Amino acid sequence: MTATDHERASGQMRLVIVGASGMVGGYALRYALENATVTSVTTIGRKTLGISHPKLTEVVHRDFADCSSLADTLSGQDAAVFCLGAYTGAVSDAELRTITVGYTVEFARVLYRSSPGAAFSFLSGNGADPTGRSRIPFARYKGEAENALLAAGFPHVYIFRPAYIYPVEPRREPNFSYRLLRATYPAFRMLFPNQVIRADDLARAMVDAAVRGIGSEHHAVVFENRDIQALVAS
């Protein structure tokens, strides 16, 4: 039994969340703060969240290309939920790869050195291609990031590949496609029930996987959208 498995069994978990200012990461933070199993939550991001809670420690880190300075912060962590990312079209292709792959790999490197027994929940995406053959950059980069995490050495890696993530609360949508999907969500959900997931449900599943463990005998588990729905319903 690893140290993390022992903590999980005793119901005392220390969790770090990257990307808590984003939609899914924000819900993950709310749920973690309410979760009695989680004794402390450390968020790492480029800006403060404006939230005060006895279990919460905020760390502002502006350069995710180099996470070496986070070594002490990441020491003694039992689990991580990684939600940092960018929308396709919002940044250049080079920057998309840097954020999707480079930042993930660098954070994982430092986390593993500081807390080698930590469990890792990663927000990937529908269509992620670990073979690198996809013509879609987002799919290739998410697949590349998945491969890096699986090779990083963590005892448990949980990869989440949601399809359309429904925002739940009103927000400024990043592009026309998202505005259209939000407007037609009731019909889209009815026609394609396995291609949607609520942001809060996804966040809860990611936190639960990291802090409770799912299929603890497995080193890595990949959850497609249908699988995430099943986790939420269980």
Image: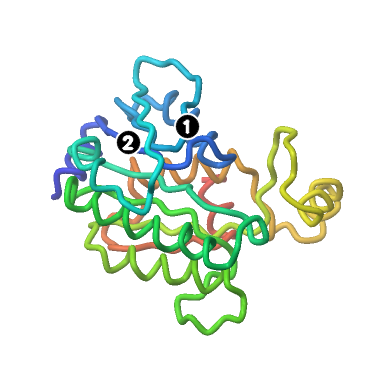
**In front of the other: 56 or 230:** 56
Residue 93 place in picture, x, y as percent: 58, 67
- The answer to whether residue 42 is above or below residue 141 is above
Q: CA distance from mark 2 to mark 1?
A: 19 Å
- Model colouring: rainbow
* Residue that carries the numbered disc 2 in the rendered image: 15
- Would you identify the image quadrant in which residue 70 lies? top left
- The answer to whether residue 22 is above or below residue 138 is above
Lateral position of residue 72 relative to residue 121, left or right:
left
- Give the label on residue 35, or none: none
Pointer 2 and pointer 1: residues touching (CB < 8 Å)? no
Number of marks present in the image shown: 2
- Would you identify the image quadrant in which residue 196 lies? bottom right
Residue 187 place in picture, x, y as percent: 86, 52
Label 2 crowding class (10 Å Cα cut-off): few <14, some 14-19, many 20+?
many
Query: Residue drawn 29% across and 49% down?
Result: 119
Sequence-wise, the earlier of marks 2 and 1 is: 2
* Residue that carries the numbered disc 1 in the rendered image: 47
Query: Residue drawn 83% across and 47% down?
Result: 186
User: Is label 2 or label 1 in front?
Assistant: 1
**In front of the other: 47 or 143:** 47
**In front of the other: 23 or 211:** 23
Lateral position of residue 44 relative to residue 73, left or right:
right
Callout 1: SS: loop
Residue 134 place in picture, x, y as percent: 57, 81
Label 1 crowding class (10 Å Cα cut-off): few <14, some 14-19, many 20+?
some
What amino acid is labelled 2 in the image? Leu
Callout 2: SS: strand
What amino acid is labelled 1 in the image? Lys
- The answer to whether residue 121 is above or below residue 21 is below
Residue 165 place in picture, x, y as percent: 65, 50
